[in-house]
Image: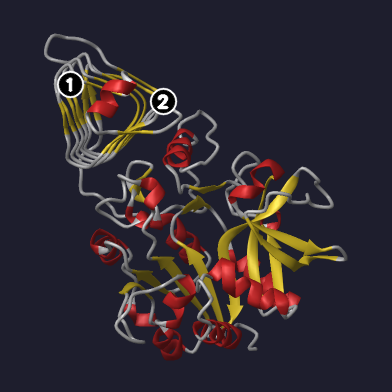
Amino acid sequence: MPAQPKVFGIVLAGGEGKRLMPLTADRAKPAVPFGGQYRLIDFAISNLINSGLRQIVVLTQYKSHSLDRHVSQTWRMSALLDSYVTSVPAQQRLGKRWFSGSADAILQSMNLINDEKPDIVIVIGADHVYRMDFRQMLAAHIESGARATVAGIRQPISLANQFGVIDVEADDPTRIREFLEKPQDAVGLADSPGEVLASMGNYIFDTDALIEAVEYDGELPTSNHDMGGDIVPYFVERGEAGVYDMNRNDVPGSTARDRYYWRDVGTIESFFDAHMDLISTLPIFNLYNTDWPIHSQTVNSPPAKFVRDSVGRIGTAIDSVVSLGSVLSGTHLERSVVGPWTLAGGGSTITDAVLFDYVRVGQGARVHRAILDKNVVVADGATVGVDRERDLERGFTVTDTGITVVAKGLVVEP
């Protein structure tokens, strides 16, 4: 392998995201807005770009129009040095069928790897919120001699049954002994019995090894063709799988509070909680780290504005994030994240809420512990998240923890 290997990035962005319904009813999970002005995929691509990668493909499939458009409009690279970020829809290159799993997505997109001929391929998911310097993981992969390396993040052992758990060799904590899918009886780490290493869904492969693995997997009728469930065990069985502990990753500009932050926002609860992590004075995840920025589309919009309403009522905004183009008139806003071009009328109250773009909240309306998708209108005097039974009667999604979700474009009447 050359001293400076050629590295190719693949972002797996074909996920349907059923557990995030109704937010994914009309869009792919990686295209779901997050943090006001971002999309979930922006975190994955930003990490790769900040790590020095300049040739990145995004494999899409499920309801991908808004995702494809976002990638093409936002992630424009200079072609002078053959740099690009491009989305690649499912192409049915191996027959008239769609991707049957993340490993099959790579198998059906093998032409991309053959065209670039990289030495190493970095494969990551598109729907996690985190920062990571892949240069450090790449150096560890090369030094270890492993043919596949899995990124692991330390999680409480009580949550082990929610993740793919990496069981390391007793005499070498950088080698994977076994990959356990959502174990009920996980054993803690030797240096921290109360924690396990959960797979982050990020992988680094020697290119020839990845090709061999996905081609072999593609011939197995019993395989689910999944990167974590099938490809990683393939390398583990051969003693060729290493693990990279996220504790070794030092992202520029990170603090002790957010250095190891990683959220799998696969459920409404985790999606909501991740937003609440953004808004404290010392946020658990800091969007304002200029040394490792999260890039997104630059919106041609005026600044957010806070004004009195027509009768002189003064609004307040406490512990909240408000995006460009929004106008809040005499509104009480607290512990909330507001997307671009939101309008809120006098006497309205928005608390513990996440609003996507172009939401309208009428005069005297109340929104509490809720997620409002794009173009939702809350009419004058209407409420969301205040009366659980009423929300259910109106067909809104209400989680067991009491988070109400209003789907795109709905009008909430009093």
Q: Does residue 182 appear to the left or right of 7 in the view shown? A: right
Which residue type carries mark 1?
Gly
Q: Is residue 214 above or below residue 197?
A: below
Q: Does residue 396 appear to the left or right of 153 in the view shown? A: left
Q: Residue at 65% across / 58% down in the picture? A: 152
Q: Residue at 27% across / 26% down in the picture? A: 391
Q: Residue at 57% across / 57% down in the picture? A: 132
When asked about the image quadrant of residue 230, the answer is: bottom right
Q: Disc 1 designates what residue?
A: 345
Instruction: Label 1: state its secondary structure.
Output: loop
Residue 271 position within the rendered picture, expressed as x and y whole percent measured from the top left: 43, 42
Q: Work out whether residue 383 can be spotted.
A: yes
Q: In the rendered picture of this protein, how many numbered marks are placed on residues?
A: 2
When asked about the image quadrant of residue 332, the answer is: top left
Residue 39 position within the rendered picture, expressed as x and y whole percent measured from the top left: 35, 52
- The residue most toward the front is 222
- The residue most toward the right is 171
Instruction: Label 2: state its secondary structure.
Output: loop
Alpha-carbon neighbours of circle 2 within 10 Å: few (<14), some, or many (≥20)?
many
Q: Does residue 201 appear to the left or right of 144 in the view shown? A: left
Alpha-carbon neighbours of circle 1 within 10 Å: few (<14), some, or many (≥20)?
many
Classify the position of the C terminus by image quarter: top left
Q: Is residue 294 above or below residue 238?
A: above
Residue 81 position within the rendered picture, expressed as x and y whole percent measured from the top left: 39, 81
Q: Disc 2 designates what residue?
A: 335
Whichever of callouts 2 and 1 sits on the residue coming sooner in the sequence is 2
Q: Does residue 19 appear to the left or right of 309 in the view shown? A: right
Classify the position of the N terminus by image quarter: bottom right
Which residue type carries mark 2?
Arg
